[in-house]
Image (spheres, rainbow, N blue to C red):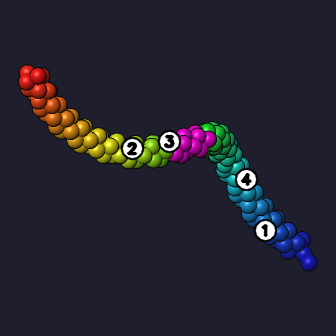
Amino acid sequence: MKDKDLLVVLAEMLRKQDQQTEILTNLMDVSIKQFEQQHKFNIEQQLVNQEQLAFIREKSAFNKEQLTFNKEQSAFNKEQSTFIREQLNINREQLVYNKEQSIYNKEQSAFSKEQLAFNKNQQSFSEKILEVNEKIVDRLERIEKKL
């Protein structure tokens, strides 16, 4: 091979090497750009994740407070239920008492009516005895006058 041919081959090889270097440089630039974009995305994602974690912690604290409130409300509801049951039992007892009182009042009323009828009969009887006594007194007075 001649020097000239060798120079042409070397020049071609150097040109191809320059092309490959340029391609590699472009690939490196693209890779660096992608890395920077991925890094930026990762940082933004980390911020979002931190915000979400803060929200989850706040939600967890709220849920704990809500659970405490629900437990207290449940205890209050149980007490209220017990009170209502006791009140219901008192009302039932009061109803039984009122029914018994009503029966007693009816019996008392019937007794009073019987007593009134008895008293009327007694009065009538007393009036008749008075009449008879007056007649006896009149006769005795007449008898005394005759004597």
Q: Which residue is mark 1?
A: 16
Check if mark 4's residue and mark 1's residue have beta carbons within 8 Å. no
Q: Main secondary structure of the magenta part?
A: helix
What separation in Å lies between label 4 and label 3 (alpha carbons)?
Answer: 80 Å
What separation in Å lies between label 4 and label 2 (alpha carbons)?
Answer: 100 Å
Q: Nearer the viewer, residue 143 or 102?
A: 143
Mark 4 and mark 3 lie on one chain; the one further toward the N terminus is 4
Q: Which residue is mark 4?
A: 35
| Mark in the foreground, 4 or 1 | 4
What separation in Å lies between label 4 and label 1 (alpha carbons)?
Answer: 28 Å
State the extent of the magenta-drawn residues as a range: 75-90
Q: Which residue is mark 3?
A: 90
What separation in Å lies between label 3 and label 2 (alpha carbons)?
Answer: 21 Å
Mark 4 and mark 1 lie on one chain; the one further toward the N terminus is 1
- Specify whether residue 143 is in view: yes
The quarter of the displayed image where residue 120 is located? top left
Secondary element under disc 2, as helix, strand or loop, is helix
Mark 3 and mark 2 lie on one chain; the one further toward the N terminus is 3
| Mark in the foreground, 4 or 3 | 3
> What amino acid is at disc 3?
Ile
| Mark in the foreground, 1 or 3 | 3
Mark 4 and mark 2 lie on one chain; the one further toward the N terminus is 4
> What amino acid is at disc 4?
Phe
Mark 1 and mark 2 lie on one chain; the one further toward the N terminus is 1
Secondary element under disc 4, as helix, strand or loop, is helix
Residue 94 lies, in percent from the top left, at: 45, 42
Q: Tell me if mark 2 has few (under 14), some (14-19) or many (20+) residues whose alpha carbon lies within 10 angstroms of its own.
A: few
Check if mark 3's residue and mark 2's residue have beta carbons within 8 Å. no
Q: Identify the residue shown where x is 57% and y is 43%.
A: 82
Q: Identify the residue shown where x is 35% and y is 46%.
A: 107
- Specify whether residue 141 is in view: no
Q: Which residue is mark 2?
A: 104
